[in-house]
Image (cartoon, coloured by chain):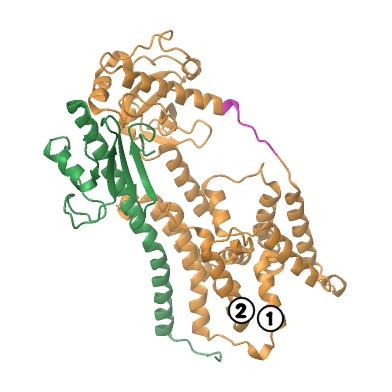
Amino acid sequence: MIAIAWLIRSHHDRIRVQGSWPITVGEVRELLPEAHRLAVDSGPKQGLRVLDADGNQIGYAMRTMPHAREIIGYSGPTDVLVVFDEKDKGVGISLRHSYDTPSHVDDVKMEFLFLESWNGRTMQEIADITDLGDAEIYAVSGATRTSEAAAESVNYRVRMTKDAEATIDSGFSVRWQDFVLILILVIGAVFAFLKNKSVQKWRWIYSLTTIGVLGLWMGDLIAQSLLVGWVESRIPWSATPGLVIFVAAAFLIPWFTKQPIYCQFICPHGNLQRWTMKWLPAKWTKRLSKDDKWIGKSIPVLLLALVIAVSFLQLDFDLAGIEPFDAYLIKSAGIATIVVAVIGILLSLIFPMAYCKYGCPTGWLLEFVRRRSGKDRFSGRDWIGVGLLGLAVALYLIPQEVFLG
Amino acid sequence: MSEKKTSSPSRRASGLLLVTIGITILLAGPILDMRTERKVRAMLLQVQEALQRYHIDEEIYPRRMQEGGSLVALLEDEGHLETSVLNPWSGERYGFEADPDYLSYRTDELAETYELIVTFPGSEEVQFRLDSTKNRSLE
């Protein structure tokens, strides 16, 4: 699971930094001949660390697009590659693709005096440039606007980098919702670990509270859309610390104690299904055959494969729609999530806890963690995990053009 | 349904196949949309570059507002397109009237600006807008 999460994160860092027109090591090598490999820097600079054959960092590369897309030359913006050496000094720029007039772009590409204007300047010196003329960076005759825009793009991109470094602010904030989540978690743990009757007799109130407060009021259910969002971008430690602790505990408590605290005690959808079991006579329920159970258990696994594919290929597919959890926020819920929620509940009237057992990819992940706890034997679930990791590795390594044309 | 003691591999295989087909169908639409979107982006950049060449030569953009097919034919005829442009919605060479075409070209009265607008198939909703004033890049 950690390996899959790392691959997704690395893939999205690569896309964030490289955008639609990835920088190639060949481009960088023209300015820094020892360049052997490029490593994505997911920090505030959002560029690429340039490595030599031994893996030592020998420079830094960045492109101006899409950050400088508002800086227009004659008829459009230009993507400029900017390369620095290991001492943070510029070694050159080169014009990459451009939305500007092709003949003007060609003129700038041929003007080496202009292209070398940044050589020897540090990032800070470039960031401090406010007037191109004062900094002795002169436009290319015949392509004045295109070259000025390219120069401004370089300065803007480097300034943006320095500003981002300077303004990294954790901005740690705790909201009342964070305290409510922690309270729900703590009470859930009480019911999970204290099995005496005097405690358990209150569980029905807690169960209804999770449906009302955690589900319908706060809508903070653990879902694939949430987990994938965090893995793709970053975990919002500072913005919603309570939710982060809540999700971390849902994975870590089963790992250390084998107690499925979230699925069995906290999850509002699980609790709603438990109430349907209580309300309906047992004689109405049916049991699935062994084969049907086997087939049903494949659904969450294949849904996880879908989640991995959607994330890697960045498909326009709302992952909230494959689970019922967003349906609790009724006002903003999409049709798909409502349909999944309603069908899940209806099925659970006949087949108890049907959604939890045969439909929930998030539950499968939590159960996967719980069952791995303290076990040395490689089970069928582990093979499924290996299969999902294999899918993630394939999507990470195979160029997207193979799938997306 | 009663619990069966023996399992049937063929039933499991057909059930798994059914589930796999269902998930594949869920993915197929977004993948096909993404493939088309990437082709549309590539086509737009080709046409934009050709329009800029046209502007250098003629001092104005094409005067007539038109659909993608006829614009591409015009740019090809006048030698502003270096390679032939494929219609992203049909995969064929642009220009056949029967093919779907969701690209339209607009210009102002003096033909000093242009707009390339791509709508989602079967709707008026704009998918991409590339022009000479505000939206000059697809990034």
Please tell me whether residue A180 is drawn above or below residue A82 in the rendered image: below
Tell me if I can see residue A33 in this picture: no
Which element carries disc 2, helix, strand or loop?
Answer: helix
Chain letter for mark 1: A
Q: Amino acid at mark 2?
A: Ser
> What is the x, y in percent for residue A212?
73, 64
Quarter of the image for the N terminus of chain A: give it: bottom right
Q: Amino acid at mark 1?
A: Met
> What is the x, y in percent for residue B123?
36, 56
Res. A71 image quadrant: top left
Magenta stretch? A165-172
Dot 2 and dot 1 residues touching (CB under 8 Å): yes
Q: Give the numbered dot on residue A226.
A: none
Nearest to the observer: residue B105 or residue A321: B105
Nearest to the observer: residue A223 or residue B63: B63
Extreme residue in the front direction: B109
> What is the x, y in percent for residue A400?
35, 50
Report if residue A171 lies within the magenta region: yes
Q: Residues within 10 Å of mark 1 (few under 14, many from 20)?
A: some
Report if residue A213 lies within the magenta region: no
Give the chain letter for orange: A
Q: Which residue is mark 2?
A: A348
Going from N to C along the chain, the mark reached first, 2 or 1, is 1
Res. B21 image quadrant: bottom left
Q: Is residue A380 left or right of residue A329?
A: left
Question: Residue at image x 71%, y 40%?
Answer: A173
Q: Which residue is mark 1?
A: A277
Give the chain letter for green: B
